[in-house]
Structure formats: C-alpha cells, structure tokens
Image (spheres, rainbow, N blue to C red):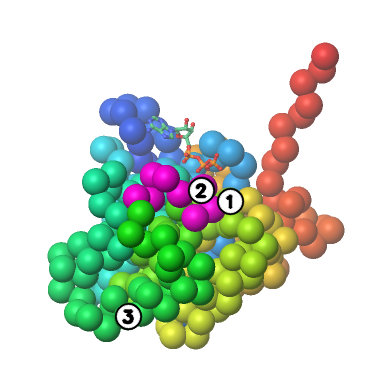
Amino acid sequence: MSLLEVNIQQAGYKANIETIRNIHFSIMKSELVGMIGSNGAGKSSTIKAFLGELPFLNGEVKREKGSNYSYIPERPIFYPELTLWEHFEFITAVEELGESSLSYAKEILKKFRLIDRIHEFPATFSKGMQQKGMIALALFTKPDLLIIDEPFMGLDPGSTKLLLNMLEEEREKGTGILMCTHILDTAQRICDSFIIIENGTMKASGSLGEVLEACGAEDGSLYSCISIEDEVNE
Ligand SMILES: Nc1ncnc2c1ncn2[C@@H]1O[C@H](COP(=O)(O)OP(=O)(O)OP(=O)(O)O)[C@@H](O)[C@H]1O
C-alpha cells in the first residue's frame, strides 16, 4: 500500500483558472521521490493541492490510514510570538507526543548546531538557521511521510551533508519522502524515482531510466528533462 496516492485532474488558486492538471503519482514506504521542474512549473502548487491548501481541487488524494506527515515549505514559517524551543513544546503538546520527542528534538538541534539558540525567536535567525529549524521541526515528530520543498536552500555545505545523511536515515526507517529541488545532480544521485513537472502538468514520471527516456535525454542527465526557454534576443 502506498503512503500517498495523488490523482489531480485540475487544481488552482482561483475558480476557472487552472494552475495544475493531470498529475498522478504515489509514494511508497522508504521511497525518495524527486519532483523537478522549472520555476513556476507547478511543483509547490502540486504539494499544496494534495495537502488541501489550494482553494480549488478536482481530484482525489489518499493517505495511508493512521499515517502522519511533515511538510517543510519552500519559505520557513514560524509563529512570531514563540521561541524556537516553544515551537517544539507547542507541537509536542498539541500532538501529544511525549517527552521522548523533545529529547529527539534536542539531538537534531545539536547536530544542526542550533542548540545554543533555541530560546531565541526564529525571526532573528539567518536564512539557513531558519531552514534548519524547520527541518528539525519536521523530523522530530517522526513522520511516515516527509514532504520537503527546496530543502537545501540556504544550507551551508556541512548542513547539506547532514541533511543528506538524515534523509538516508529516514528512508532506512521506512519514511516516504517527496522532495522538490533544483539541485539536479544531487536529485539524480539520491532519488529512487522522479516526477517531472512542466507547465502545470506531468511531463514524465518513474525511475531515472524511465524519465530520461520519456524526455529523450540522451546525455543521461536530468538537466535535459527541464525545458529551458529560448534566450530573448537583444
Ligand atoms: N498564491 C498564489 N496565487 C496565485 N497563483 C499562484 C500562487 N502561488 C503560485 N501561483 C502560480 O502558480 C504557478 C506555479 O507556481 P509554483 O509555485 O507551483 O511553481 P514551482 O514549480 O514551485 O516554482 P519554483 O521552482 O519557482 O518554486 C505560477 O504561475 C505561479 O505564479
């Protein structure tokens, strides 16, 4: 059984304005799925659509019964009136997670070198620190499904390496992961399967070999699956 099955016929932000259409995929346990496409192709909108955050959706989304998910949006979102640590305490209380989750949170925060800053407000953090705070908040709940939009944005090389290790550990635990990224060489190296989004629809999906073939990418590179607009003549 898949952790997530998405069948979107159409979805959008405004009535009668279709932002995405005909997007169908599923995510299995321990599967790392890379969603790639140009700026504005519709990746974040696809995520918002299956999370129920778009006002208009014609389609069907199925999640495995009893499974939980974490979503790391493209831009970090925090409660302005809470310190970083209060975010962990708040989620622990709301989701009735228990003390062991808070110990796990501290472990992650130590790895990300944020432990000395947990009593500060995330709005005062650097971009990369905010991103690491969001990642820690997503992971400490031990989700079955992890959805991450541009996870490497703003991370320094050490934190990028740490995140890659953490994704691998999550996968080994059985977590299904959907990751949107423009870092195609990393995606090509670590993802089990791919969804290529272009102009609001799915251009190809499947294993690396399948998407490369569907895109006619003879050079064997995911870069060839992304259409690049003709340069504007001066
Ligand atoms: N809040 C919104 N209201 C209306 N239209 C939106 C909104 N957010 C995004 N769009 C539109 O939806 C389309 C797809 O945008 P989306 O953010 O899904 O792209 P993306 O593939 O995630 O791009 P990027 O790689 O730049 O993050 C774009 O035309 C964009 O202008």
Marks 2 & 3, CB-CB < 8 Å contact? no
Mark 1, residue position: 154
Marks 1 & 2, CB-CB < 8 Å contact? yes
Dot 3 beta carbon under 8 Å from ligand 1: no
Q: Earlier in the sequence, mark 1 or mark 3?
A: 3
Q: Position of residue 221 (x, y in %)?
A: 77, 59
* Circle 1 or circle 2, nearest the eye: 2
Q: Which mark is residue 103?
A: 3
Q: Label 1 neighbourhood size at 10 Å, few (<14), some (14-19), many (20+)?
A: some
Q: Position of residue 53 (x, y in %)?
A: 29, 45
From where the camera sits, is residue 191 visible? no
Give the quarter of the image for residue 91. Answer: bottom left
Q: Which mark is residue 60?
A: none
**CA–CA distance between discs 1 and 2?**
9 Å
Q: Amino acid at mark 1?
A: Gly
At x 82%, y 58%, the residue is: 218
Q: Position of residue 109 (x, y in %)?
A: 43, 70
At x 51%, y 48%, the residue is: 126
Q: Amino acid at mark 3?
A: Ser
Mark 2, residue position: 126
**CA–CA distance between discs 1 and 3?**
26 Å
Quarter of the image containing the N terminus? bottom left
